[in-house]
Image: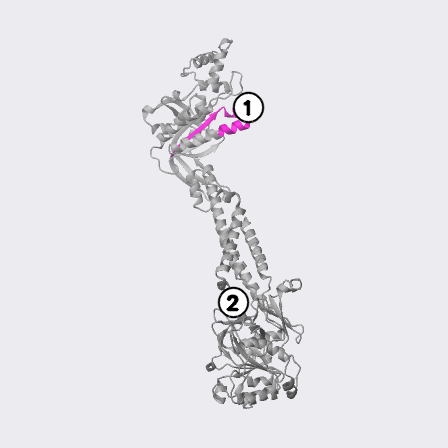
Amino acid sequence: MALWRNRPWLLRASALVAAAIVVVLVQWLAPRTLGGVEAFTGDMAWRVGASSQPERRLVVVDIDEASLRDVGPWPWPRATMAELAQKLAKAGALVQAYDIAFTDAKAGDDELQKAWAQTAVVAGQVFSIDPSVTPVAGVVSGHLGMAGCPPFAPVSHGHYGSSEALLPAHPAVGHLTPRIEADGVVRKLPALVCHQGRAYPSLALATLWRAAQPESGAAEGAARGLPLPDWEWHIASDHRLVSGLLAPAAWLTSRSLPGLVIPLDAQGDLRVPYALDRKAFASVSASDVLKDRADTAMLKGAVVLVGATAFGIGDTVATPHGAVASGLEVHAQALVGLLDHRLPYTPTTWPALQWVAMLVVATTLHLVARQGRGAPAKRLPLTGLALAAVCIAGAVVGLLRFDLWLPWASTALFAMLASVMLATAEHALTRAQRERLSAHLGSYLPAPVAQRLMKSDPSGSLQVEQRDVTVLVADIRNFSAFATHRPAEETAIMLHSFCCIAVDVVEQFGGVVENVVGDSVLAVWNAYSDCPDHPKQAMAAAQELVRATRQLLASGPPITESSPVQPLALGVGLESGSAIVGSFGPARRRAHAALGEPVSVANRIQQMTADLSMPILVGPTLAAGLPAEGVEPQGEYLLEGLSKHYRLFAPVGWSDLVSIDPNWAASAAAGADRQNDSTEWSRWADNASSGTTVAGPLRAVGSIQLRDA
């Protein structure tokens, strides 16, 4: 965890890489899931953005329920279909395209063949691209003039062709084969189907090509027939230098239709643009045409698409506009897209562009994560959702405005996953930082206070509690002179060691270090948790603190009488009483302290330890809480800054806590041969050299304080 805390960018990068790996795995293991989401969104876009502007270039002649009632059940006699073709030709239809396969030879084929020979006709045929379905019926016709098959074209495993008797009319032929996706919706059509080494165009392509051919008389058309469709295929991989950034995987062109480019995907499919609302198509009932009840003015110069929408015929498919639609609608929408030169497709460079988009998403999320304001762990998921929404909106706009089918699900999934993973990483970093801050807070404040602060919001109110506490104040004497004449590093090491010992001792005896200022430590008992015997615990802590610091405070370098630095010693003052413990100050800068008489008295008593040459002094309230045989009185004193006298006490056997500094003892012994006017010094040096503890009116620590004075 220390690695992540010290290098947060590494954790963020790991989260983004993990999200990218998950997206790649989903693309590999469940591509249909992402494709299904994209298809659903595309269907919604078609439904919402479909144009309702009337379409008059294409007219649907509908074999509907009314036609079946008026004319008879389907299939109709070929003579009836011949009559329908003649009436459409008389009305001036430019091309008659039949969403019908006339497979079997039937009575009346001659009449239908003659009717077709007088006009421009596109017949339908069906291929099976399913290896498990292998029908063979009728004759396949209408292959391209370009030899061979493109590598992307699906292969036919069976067919429903046209009756051989109809072929002398030389109709153009287009296949009706749909590409049914996993959810049953037809969104694509194979532009070309490969059958026995030749390529055959779809009905929409054949109709568009036939409409571009010059008109010919019946006799001339029957004599020489139609030329082969001149569609040519192109593959982006064969045109890398000229294909461009937004080139499709493959496309078709035709000399008969200069300037027209029909984009295809890598499977050779033409994506059907469902950009027109169903109600926008002009539709005429076939029975009305046969019975001369229709307004045939709309048929003049239009491409007429003849097909069946009657439910009983069974030619129903699912489209983005509805779960039940006639197959006729698919070819009508494809033909309108061809006429408008607006067929959606996916650029062949989109995978690379998608990675660029993911990089942009990752960069955006990383910048949001690095912002110092607010809570990134909360902002990131919202940012991820916003970026995913931008991906969806971009795909919809690209489809409806620019005819680009842009797979967006992977990028949107990455945005959401990356935002969640990055938010998790940021939460982990924040938690680690809070734990670190908590640890620091607990080291600068009493642990109970730090824990309370972590559980509450910042406040600018006064938050205090009155408690019966015991206060300990410990201070190193002569430390200012020591710090002045010793290197700063040595001074810092001394303070650090003293503070560590003091904290350990206080906590060992159930106290809490309230404050550390330089060489002074203030500790309290019974301030944050109940401690019934806090006077005894504080006294024991004071005695142990003096013992534990004796070796630390012993002077390192030799000290002589003329040395500017006097030996260090510890003075401890203790007192009990009622005090206020808590926090105060504005919310932006709080302070925590223990306030009250015991704090003031303990501070003054600690200062008195130097004057009385004693390591520990106890106030009257604390002494009352201790066994009488454990303390001895030291007299009454008017403490500095306080208005009344206080009787002070010292623990019995306090002299055992004081050690003789060996440097001073050695210096005193060496100076015994020299003349010295100070009788106090000679007495102290003699006692020190003999190894005895100085007690009574003249004490070692007291002599140090007098010299300092």
Taking the image as shown, residue 482 lies to the left or right of residue 234, namely: left
Residue denoted by label 2: 39
Q: What element carries label 2?
A: helix
**Residue drawn at point x = 49 percent, y = 85 percent:** 75
In this view, the residue in front, 43 or 138, is: 138
The nearer-to-camera label among 1 and 2 is 2
Region of the chain picked out in magenta, as a range: 469-495
Please say if 149 is above or below 646. Answer: below
Residue at left offset 42%, top offset 42%: 451
Res 459 visible = no
Mark 1 packing: few (<14 Cα in 10 Å), some, or many (20+)?
few
Dot 1 falls on a residue whose secondary structure is helix
Residue 92: give x, y in percent of width and height.
62, 86
- Residue at which label 1 appears: 485
| C-alpha distance separating marks 1 and 2 | 82 Å
Inspect the magenta stretch and tell me whether residue 491 lies in it. yes
Residue 181 or residue 153, whichever sits in front: 153
